[in-house]
Amino acid sequence: MTRPILWALGVLAGAVVAGGSVTERIARSGLSGSAPLTVSPAAPAPVPARPGAEASVTLAQDLSGHYKAHPEVEGRVLRMLVDTGATLCVFTREDAERIGLRVTERDFTAKVGTANGTVPAAPVRVRELRVGGIAVRDVEALVLPSGRLETSLLGMSFLRRLRGFEVAGGRMILRG
C-alpha cells in the first residue's frame, strides 16, 4: 500500500518541478489562507556546522533497495526515507508532532494527488534539518494526515540544497 503512495508522490514531484513548488502554486491559487507554519522553539537550536566545513554522509542501501536517513529536526531524531522523486520533504503527522509542528485540520490547505486519490496536506517550514554533519536551514515541507504515509520522506527541498549527492555501489553519498 505504501508503494502506490510513494509512486504517486514521485509523480506529483515531477509535476510540481515542471510548474513550481507546491507552496508557490498554493500561494498563486489563493488556497492558502495563511503563511506556512514554522516550528516553535521547543528545544535549543542545534549548533550549526562550521562555516567552510565540508561534510559528507554515506547511507547504505537497505534490503528493499531504499536509502533511509535519521535526520535531526528541531532536536529530535526521525527516520526518513530518502526520496529523490519528492519535490519537498514530507512528514507523517506523528513525526510532525514529534518535532514540535502542531497542525490543525484547517492547516491542510494543499491537495496532493496520489494513487489512492487526493490527500490533503499542510505546508510547513522547519528551521533546520541535519543529517550527520550536514545542516540545511529553512526547509519547505508538507505534513500528511495520520495513516496516509508510513514513513516521512527526505525530499528535494533538502537534497537540492546540498553541494551534491550520488548513488553508486549500494551507497548514497550526501555532500554538504
Image: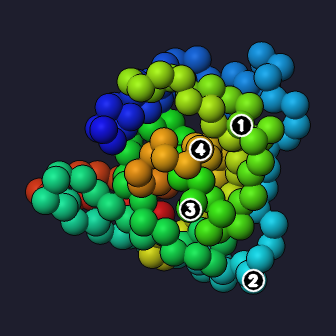
Badge 2 or badge 4: first in the primary sequence: 2
Number of other residues with Cα within 10 Å of mark 4, as a class: few under 14, some 14 to 19, many 20 or more = some
Q: Are marks 2 and 1 in contact (CB under 8 Å)?
A: no
Image height check: is 21 above or below 165?
above
Contact? badges 4 and 1 (CB < 8 Å): yes
Q: Percent x, y for residue 77?
A: 51, 75
Q: Earlier in the sequence, mark 2 or mark 3?
A: 2
Task: Locate residue 72 relative to residue 51 in the image: left or right.
Answer: left
Amino acid under label 2? Pro
Please provide percent x and percent y for residue 56. 38, 69
3D distance between C-alphas at marks 4 and 3: 11 Å
Residue 130 lies in quadrant: bottom right
Disc with the residue nearer the chain's start (2 vs 1) = 2
Q: Which residue is mark 1?
A: 108
**Viewer-side label of 4, 3:** 4
Q: CA distance from mark 2 to mark 3?
A: 19 Å
The x and y percentages for residue 99 are: 64, 68
Decide which of tag 3 and tag 1 comes sooner along the chain. 3
Residue assigned mark 4: 145
Secondary structure beneath dot 4 equals loop
Give above or below for 174 relative to 153.
below
What residue sits 63% from the left and 78% below the top?
Answer: 75
Spatial CA distance of label 4 from label 1 is: 8 Å
Secondary structure of residue under mark 2:
loop
Q: Nearer the viewer, residue 117 or 69?
A: 117
Which residue is label 3 attached to? 95
Identify the residue shown where x is 19% and y is 61%.
62
Question: Which residue is at a point 22% across and 65% down the rendered structure image?
Answer: 60
Query: Is residue 159 shown to the viewer in this render?
Result: no
Q: Residue at x 50, y 36 (%)?
A: 87
Give the mark nearest the N terminus, 4 or 1.
1
